[in-house]
Image: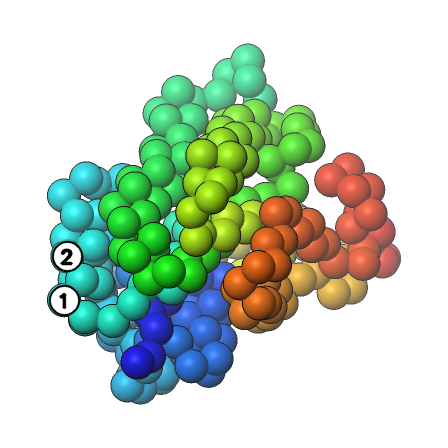
């Protein structure tokens, strides 16, 4: 029987790339995201190996509906990719927006918590479940202007590490993928409220930032190792980014 992989934030960027890749690996992918039109386009592209479910990970009711939709498929849930997340703004702590911080906490931390809780029983029942959470190098390295996002990603990595300890002895792997600089169509654009110039400036002079397919490749690699192999944390950056604050830019 074909196994199910649930991918949140699947309407664009890393989530969409991961859905494509996992479908190619033989999973039946449940692509979950808020934007129905984007999901419909993804289904047309991938074909029979994907089911779209409109889901907002910041809503208890929406996540419960996602879990119900997954259960209706009647197949083992082998993989959950907690990819939904994002950053808002680049304000300093002194004048940062509390609403922006709240929004980042809600999607990155509580969104991961909701979806994980909702699908844990099915993952355990499969007998060989895997949870992959897409974090960030911000999960362990602060930087100026990133306080809200850094705090949220630190919270998310704490959740993942605690979960791994609490699931010890159960047939569920807990994996964290922490990307550095990844250029996608929307991450920086959303962060800066649609300001294309500010979004482009993040990657100015960087010869080859990572792209969504690079991270999807890493997620697929980690998820398809033999079940006894758990990749606790995998940090992946472009060669141009030696550290959070050390980026080589060509001029």
Observer able to see residue 91 = no
Label 2 close to label 1 by CB (< 8 Å): yes
Work out which quarter of the rendered image holds the C terminus and state it.
Answer: bottom right
Disc number placed over residue 32 in the picture, else none: none
Is disc 2 surrounded by few (<14), some (14 to 19) or many (20+) residues within 10 Å?
few
Disc number placed over residue 68 in the picture, else none: 2
Q: Which residue occupies the foreground of this view, 227 or 96?
A: 227
Q: Quadrant of residue 193?
A: top left
Q: Secondary structure at mark 1?
A: helix
Image x and y of residue 69, in percent: 16, 62
Q: Residue at x 49, y 40 (%)?
A: 168
Q: Residue at x 41, y 70 (%)?
A: 19
Is 142 on the left or on the right of 212, as rendered? right
Up/down of 128 relative to 95, above or below? below
Image x and y of residue 92, in percent: 58, 22
Up/down of 183 relative to 120, above or below? below
Q: Residue at x 66, y 28 (%)?
A: 142
Image x and y of residue 201, in percent: 65, 50
- Residue under circle 1? 72
Q: Residue at x 74, y 65 (%)?
A: 208
Is 245 on the left or on the right of 131, as rendered? right
Is 66 on the left or on the right of 244, as rendered? left
Residue with the most extreme top position: 94
Image x and y of residue 187, in percent: 50, 52
Q: Which residue occupies the foreground of this view, 75 or 150?
A: 75
Q: CA distance from mark 2 to mark 1?
A: 6 Å
């Amino acid at each position: 029987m074909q196994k199910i992989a649930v991918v949140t934030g699947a309407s664009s960027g890393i989530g969409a790339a991961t859905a494509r890749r996992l479908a190619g690996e033989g999973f039946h992918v449940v692509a979950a995201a808020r934007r129905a039109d984007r999901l419909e386009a993804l289904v047309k592209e991938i074909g029979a190996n994907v089911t779209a479910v409109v889901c907002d990970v910041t809503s208890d009711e929406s996540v419960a509906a996602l879990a119900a939709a997954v259960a209706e498929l009647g197949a083992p849930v082998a993989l959950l990719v907690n990819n939904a997340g994002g950053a808002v703004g680049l304000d300093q702590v002194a004048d940062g927006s509390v609403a922006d911080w709240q929004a980042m906490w809600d999607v990155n931390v509580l969104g991961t918590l909701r979806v994980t809780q909702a699908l844990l029983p099915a993952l355990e029942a499969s007998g060989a479940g895997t949870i992959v959470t897409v974090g960030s190098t911000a999960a362990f390295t602060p930087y100026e202007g990133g306080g809200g996002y850094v705090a949220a990603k630190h919270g998310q990595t704490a959740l993942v590490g605690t979960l791994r300890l609490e699931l010890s002895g159960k047939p569920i792997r807990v994996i964290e993928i922490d990307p550095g600089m990844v250029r996608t169509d929307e991450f920086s654009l959303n962060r800066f409220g649609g300001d294309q110039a500010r979004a482009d400036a993040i990657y100015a002079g960087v010869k080859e930032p990572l792209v969504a397919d690079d991270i999807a490749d890493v997620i697929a690699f980690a998820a398809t190792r033999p079940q006894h192999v758990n990749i606790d944390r995998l940090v992946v950056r472009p060669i141009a980014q030696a550290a959070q604050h050390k980026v080589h830019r060509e001029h």
